[in-house]
Structures are given as structure tokens and as C-alpha cells.
Image (cartoon, grey):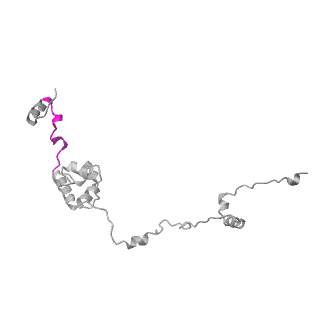
């Protein structure tokens, strides 16, 4: 009989993840000599929403007070003068540029955070430059700029070409 030579191996099902995490399973694995890796999660047992971070001490040592850059008071005065020259209230100006009246109030008081999109809209409505080296000067409407030779008619080109010595091809 060769029954004594036959070896039958019954496989056990793999343990579930929840049972593998239990303390019993960990101890059993240690007894069997299996390598066990355990990690302690930081702050995992608490249900605190606002836990102090590791950088708190660093932030406390920080001496510089960090603030947002605000618009200058000079620009605020220019906005106010331009708005009043057009006969607009803060609310009307805000409506024209599709912003809240509080934005205009903040900009005129010098408390607003500079936003080029908003400043550009205000410039177009009040007609005064609020950025760059031409601060406070009237804006030139887009249609009033000098036209180039290419935008004029052929007769104008002939007249200009005679005075500017441009060549006109026929």
C-alpha cells in the first residue's frame, strides 16, 4: 500500500484584513516568526478637527507680519474723483463693471487687493489711467489712435507716399 506515501495538504482561507489587524493575529504571526511591520499613525485616535501642526512653533517665532498688498490711497482718490466727474455713485460704478459695491468702497478707501481685471474695468468706465506711468491721465479711446497707412484708402496712400517717399506697387 502506497497510502502512507501520499501527503494531502488542506489549504486554509486567507485571513480577512480586519482579522489580520487584530492584536491576536499580530501576536500569532510573531510566534510563527513572520516579519511584522507595525506603524503608529499620528493623531489617528483623536477626533479633533483642528490639530496643532508641527510648524506652529516656527510660525510663532516669525516676527514679520504678513499682509496682502493693498491698492494705494492715491489710486483710490483717482477712482473717487473720476467716478464723481462722471456723476456716478459707488453702486452705479459697481453695476457698470459687474462687481459688488463693496469692491468700489474698498478700492476708494485703499483697502482693496489689486486685481488688474477690476482696475481695467474701472479705467474704461471712468476714463482715467489707474496703472503704469500715466497714472491719473485721461485714457485715449480705442478709436482715436493714429491710423497706419494700411488702413487708409488707395488715394490717401498715394498722397502719403508722395510725402513719405513710400513705394506703391501697381
**Residue 92 in the image, given as x and y percentages of width and height:** 24, 51
Question: Residue 4 magenta-drawn?
Answer: no
Count up the numbered dots: 0
* In the foreground, 138 or 93: 138
Frontmost residue, 56 versus 170:
170
The residue lying furthest to the right in this view is 1
Residue 150, quarter of picture: top left
Residue 32 position in % (x across, y down): 72, 65
Task: From the viewer's perspective, tell me whether residue 80 is left or right of residue 39.
Answer: left
* Residue 92 in view, yes or no: no
Q: Is residue 61 visible?
A: yes
> Is 144 colored magenta in this rendering?
yes
Residue 55 locus on image (x, y percent) = 43, 69
Taking the view exactly as shown, the residue that stands out farthest to the top is 170
Question: As displayed, is residue 51 above or below residue 144?
Answer: below
Given residues 96 and 18, the one toward you in this image is 18
Q: Is residue 33 left or right of residue 154?
A: right
Where does the magenta region start and end?
A: 138-154
User: 112 or 26, which lies in front?
Assistant: 26
- The outermost residue toward the left is 163
Question: Is residue 137 rendered to the left or right of residue 52?
Answer: left
Q: Residue at x 31, y 62 (%)?
A: 68
Name which residue lies at 21% across and 48% down: 125
> Residue 30: where, in percent of width, then height?
69, 67
Quadrant in which the C terminus appears: top left
Amino acid at each position: 500500500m502506497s497510502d502512507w506515501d501520499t501527503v494531502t495538504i488542506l489549504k486554509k482561507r486567507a485571513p480577512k484584513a480586519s482579522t489580520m489587524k487584530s492584536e491576536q493575529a499580530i501576536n500569532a504571526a510573531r510566534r510563527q516568526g513572520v516579519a511584522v511591520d507595525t506603524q503608529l499613525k499620528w493623531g489617528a485616535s483623536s477626533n479633533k478637527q483642528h490639530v496643532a501642526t508641527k510648524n506652529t512653533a516656527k510660525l510663532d517665532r516669525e516676527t514679520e507680519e504678513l499682509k496682502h498688498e493693498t491698492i494705494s490711497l492715491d489710486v483710490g482718490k483717482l477712482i473717487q474723483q473720476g467716478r464723481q466727474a462722471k456723476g456716478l455713485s459707488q453702486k452705479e460704478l459697481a453695476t457698470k463693471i459687474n462687481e459688488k459695491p463693496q469692491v468700489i468702497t474698498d478700492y476708494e478707501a485703499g483697502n482693496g487687493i489689486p486685481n488688474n481685471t477690476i482696475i481695467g474695468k474701472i479705467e474704461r468706465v471712468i476714463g482715467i489711467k489707474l496703472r503704469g506711468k500715466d497714472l491719473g491721465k485721461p485714457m485715449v479711446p480705442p478709436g482715436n489712435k493714429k491710423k497706419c497707412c494700411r488702413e487708409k484708402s488707395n488715394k490717401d496712400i498715394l498722397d502719403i507716399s508722395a510725402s513719405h517717399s513710400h513705394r506703391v506697387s501697381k
